Image: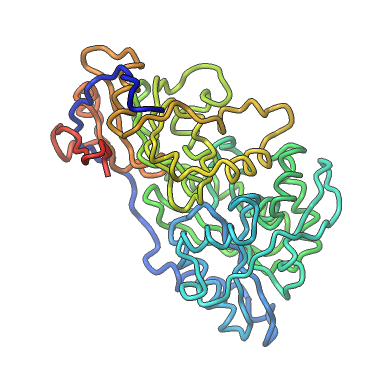
Amino acid sequence: MTETIPFPQRDVPPLARVRQRLSSDHIADVRRETRERLLSAGLREKIKPGAVVAVTAGSRGMGGFVELVAGCVDAIKQCGGEPFVIPAMGSHGGATAEGQTEILRRLGVTEESAGAPVRATMHTHALGTSETGAIAHLDDLAAVADGVIVLGRTKTHPENTAGVASGLLKMVTVGLGKQAGAQEAHTHGLWDSVKAVPKLTMARAKILFGVAVVENAFRQPVVIEVVPPVYEAFKEADERLLEAAKPHVAKLPFQQLDLLVVDELGKNISGTGMDLNVIGDWRMKGGEHAPDFRRIAVLSLTHASLGNGLGIGLADFTTRRFLEEYDAAVTYVNLLTATEPGALNTREGPLPLALLSDRAAIGVALFSSLAGESPRVCRVRSTARLAEFWVSEGLLEEVEQNDSLSVEEKPAPLEFDGAGNLF
C-alpha cells in the first residue's frame, strides 16, 4: 500500500438515500421490563440475602444491552442478592480478561452503568465430556457464584438460520465456556456441541434463569422472556424465539450489485464481521453467487471490536484506517478458536487489498467490478443497520418499483474530507 502506485479507479457515482420500511415496534422501558419479568418468574425464591449472583454479558452489542444488564442487576438487588457482571464471549478480546472487560466498557457496560462490578477471568472448570466429545467448560467466577443469570439474544447466526442458532444454549456453551469451551465446541462441531454441552453445564452450574431477547431491525428489544433453568426449556426457547426473530431480520432488497460499500465491520455486528445472511454465504463456502455482490469494500472497523477484524477477508478491498484499528493477534486468536478442523483456509482472516482512503477503496473496487455505464452501487452503515442505505442511479428504478422502499434524498455526490475519507 503506497501512494506512488496509481491504482486504476472509477469516479464514485452520486448516491440517493433510501429508507426501507421495517417494523419499529419495541419495548419502551427495557430495564423495567427485565427487572419485573425476573421478579415475576420467582427470582425471590431462588436468592437468599447476600447471595452472590453473576449476570452474563456478551460481545455482540445487542439492542438495549446496558438496560438489559442493569435490569438483571436491579432484580437481584431487589431480592437481597449481590450481583456482578461477567464477560461471556468465548475468545473475544484477545482471550484475555482485560480485553473482555474493555469490550464491555466499549459497549457501555461498566460498574457505573450496570450498577454492579464487572469481574473477569479466562480460567474455567472442566465439567466433563459431552456427547460430541467436546469438554464442557464453565467460567471460574460463575462456578463459585451462588447463582448465574444467562442473558442472551436469540437470532439467526451467520452460519445457521434454523433450529438452535445464537441464543441461550450458545451463551452457555461458548460464552460461559470462555476460550477453552469455545475451542472445544468448534473442534467437535459447533452446532452439535451447542446442543450437547449445556446438558452437562446446566446440570452442574447454578443457573437461576435465562433471559432471552429478540430485537427488531433497529436493534431494539421486542421480546424479553425469562426461561426456567432447565435444558429442555432453554432449547425450546431458542428454537421458538428464533422463529419469532426471523420477521425482524432485514436484508438488502437487491440480488445483484456491482459494489457494496460497508462503512463498518465488527464483532459487535456479526460473528463474521459482516452477516453472511446479508452478503451471501458463498463468500465463505463457495457455490452459487446469491446474492451476487461482485465487490465489497469495507471502510472501517468498529471501536467495540477491540481490533478484532475477523471477517475482513470476506471483503475485496479495505482502507488504511481499517488497518490502523486492526489487531492481527486479537483477530487470529478468535480465528483459531472458531475454526473447524481442516478449515484454516477460511476467507474470514486474510486481509484484502487496502487503499489509502475511502475514496480510493470505493473507486478501485468499482473499477475492478467491470461495471457498465450505470453501475449498481449500494452503501450501508453495516450489515446490521439496513433500515437506511444509499444507492446509485443504476438502482433507482428497482427502488421505485418496490413498495417497501422510498427515496428520502435524491442522488448527490459523496462528501469526502481532505484525506479522502467519508467521516
Q: Nearer the viewer, residue 10 or 157?
A: 10
Q: Nearer the viewer, residue 184 or 407?
A: 184
Quadrant of the drawing holding the N terminus: top left
Residue 418 position (above or below residue 347): below
Residue 142 position (above or below residue 183): below
- The colouring scheme, among rainbow, by chain, secondary structure or one colour, is rainbow
Quarter occupied by residue 230: bottom right
Name the side, left or right, on which 190 lies relative to 212: right
Q: Residue at x 67, y 68 (%)?
A: 148
Quadrant of the drawing holding the C terminus: top left
Pinpoint residue 221: horizontal percent, then vertical percent.
44, 58
Q: Residue at x 51, y 47 (%)?
A: 307
Quarter occupied by residue 77: bottom right
Q: Residue at x 28, y 42 (%)?
A: 388
Most extreme residue toward the front is 4
Q: Nearer the viewer, residue 120 or 18?
A: 120
Label total for image = 0
Quarter occupied by residue 325: top left
Q: Residue at x 31, y 19 (%)?
A: 6
Pinpoint residue 33: horizontal percent, then vertical percent.
46, 70
Q: Nearer the viewer, residue 341 or 79?
A: 341
Name the side, left or right, on which 279 lies relative to 381: right
Pinpoint residue 44: horizontal percent, then vertical percent.
63, 81
